[in-house]
Image: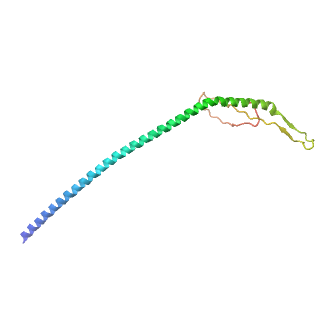
Amino acid sequence: MKRKWTEVSTRVRQVWEAIQNVVARVVNSVREKVAGVTNSIRRKWDEVSTKVRQVWQAIKNIVADRINSIKNFVASAKNRLRSMFDPLKNAAKNVFSTVARFWNRTVGRLSFRAPSWVPGLGGKGFSMPKLPTYHQGGEITGGRKGTEVPIMALVGEREHDRGH
């Protein structure tokens, strides 16, 4: 009986090992197939994402080029218009400033105030208005030409005309 038991247990062990080997081969085969499919999907994904990045970069470059072309066109047009109209603007400013200075030195100085003892008009009067003039600005000296010079300044128009 012991011998039979040994034979049966040996045979069961052999069958069990055979089953384990078959199952292990099947599991390894499935594992290899899944790994192969996963690697294939990963490679394709990397290829697709690389192409998408390249296309996106190309689109961004095209859009940036078009935007820069438009900016350059607008800047060029602005500079051409400025070069055309600045002389006209400056001429008009000079004419207006000349007329304003003439007015302020002549008619702009006229004013009248009735003496206080005149009934109904006493202390009342009128003055011709002063016309503003365009100013040309000034130059800050003290540094080399083209360098920044720190200054503290109060800038603005005075209420009375200084003959400018």
Task: Decide if residue 98 is on the left or right side of residue 50.
Answer: right
Task: Decide if residue 164 is on the left or right side of residue 77.
Answer: right
Task: Decide if residue 85 is on the left or right side of residue 122.
Answer: left
Residue 41 picture location, percent across and down: 30, 50
The residue drawn where x is 17% and y is 61% is 20
Q: How many marks?
A: 0
11 up-or-down from 74: above or below: below
The residue drawn where x is 79% and y is 30% is 105
Asked whether 129 or 1 is in front, the reply is 129
Q: Quadrant of the N terminus?
A: bottom left
Residue 161 picture location, percent across and down: 76, 33
Q: Residue furthest bottom?
A: 1
61 up-or-down from 34: above or below: above
Residue 63 picture location, percent across and down: 47, 40
The residue drawn where x is 22% and y is 58% is 27
Q: Quadrant of the C terminus?
A: top right
Q: How is the image coloured?
A: rainbow
Q: Residue furthest top?
A: 145
Asked whether 71 or 14 is in front, the reply is 71
The residue drawn where x is 74% and y is 29% is 98
Residue 9 in view: yes
Q: Quadrant of residue 2?
A: bottom left
Residue 141 in view: no
